[in-house]
Image: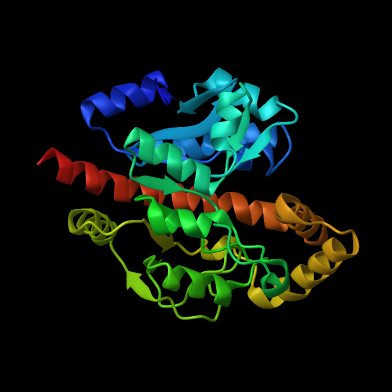
Amino acid sequence: MTLFTPSAEVAKAQAEGTPIVALESTIITHGMPYPQNLEVARQVEADVRAAGAVAATMAVLNGTLRVGLDDAELEALAKAKGVAKLSRADMAACIATGGTGATTVAATMIAARLAGIHVFATGGIGGVHKGAELSFDISADLMELAQTPVTVVAAGAKAILDIPKTLEVLETQGVPVIAYGQNDMPAFWSRESGLPAPLRMDDPAQIAAAHRLRGEMGVPGGQLIGNPIPKDAEISAEVLAPIIARAQADADAFGIAGKGVTPYLLQRIFELTEGKSLEANIALVRNNAKLAAGIAKHLADYSAK
């Protein structure tokens, strides 16, 4: 049984040893409205290509796991309604029932592993939600990082989360958390969280080498690279704190829970910041795509030796 179908561009890259960067698809289906979602998806893919790699946007289309989408498929996904949001628990079920779904961080990592892709660029990972000591609401992204050998480039954990607890869980799971170019762990829309990063690296070649060495040592799991949002696009943590608190209070008041929490909070913060949070989100995703391409190039260069 064929577990995935690559796009023509990805298949060519695999055959030729060209570096590939995995991209998620929930940012397209659940992150912003059409046509802006399509414009951003195209731009992020273009950023990867401009940096010397091939983009592989992941999604399940009519029961087929697609590793890379052509432009028509990307547009169809951007326009689609009622698309499932897939993680580790429901990805296989969606494929088995012929469904269509967009991949979260965890699902994208699984798809990347199946396709032999080692680097993945996203916006921010999921993590431990505030109040998790009562709700037990912890993203599957953290467990996926502990077991799936993919380097994930993100602007840290989403700022709506409990970042200290998220870092604690990652440490317990043995996941390397590496800040790129600074000592402080970035916090999605903000360059700094006020928390020291466990590790720091300033060179994509070092990140690639660490990924490769973990594999050679037989250590399971991937790496989380905290890539700070560009300075001219950030929203300071001080400005965001009361906005996030209000959005969380609204979610509690409306009984929002489970998979609905993150989309609700992001939409509410978009409203409260008058769209600035989405502008920042786009900037950080593009920034992460460029760094991921650099890491992928170093991994491909090593494999070619």
In the picture, residue 99 is in which quadrant? top right
Q: Nearer the viewer, residue 189 or 124?
A: 124
Give the quarter of the figure containing the C terminus: top left
From the top left corner, tell me how far across and down residue 225 is, in percent: 41, 61
**40, above or below 9, in the image:** below
Considering depth in this image, is 144 or 298 the residue closer to the camera? 144
On-image quarter of the N terminus: top left
At 54% across and 33% down in the image, what residue appears?
92
Q: Is residue 266 left or right of residue 212?
A: right
Residue at 31% x, 56% y is 220
In this rendering, the count of numbered labels is 0
Can I make out residue 21 in this image?
Answer: no
Q: Is residue 219 left or right of residue 136?
A: left
**Residue 135 or 75: which is nearer the viewer?**
135
- Image coords of residue 192 (percent x, y): 53, 74
The residue at the point 23 percent across, 48 percent down is 298
Residue 134 vertical placement versus 203 (above, below): below
Give residue 128's quadrant in the image: bottom right
Q: Is residue 293 left or right of residue 44?
A: left
Residue positioned 72% across, 32% down in the render:
34
**Residue 117 visible in the displayed image:** yes
Residues 196 and 257: in front is 257
Q: Colour scheme used in the picture?
A: rainbow
Q: Residue furthest left?
A: 305
Residue 243 percent coordinates (x, y): 78, 69
Q: Where residue 67 appears, x then y in whole percent? A: 44, 29
Please indicate whether residue 296 sits to the left or right of residue 168 in the image.
left
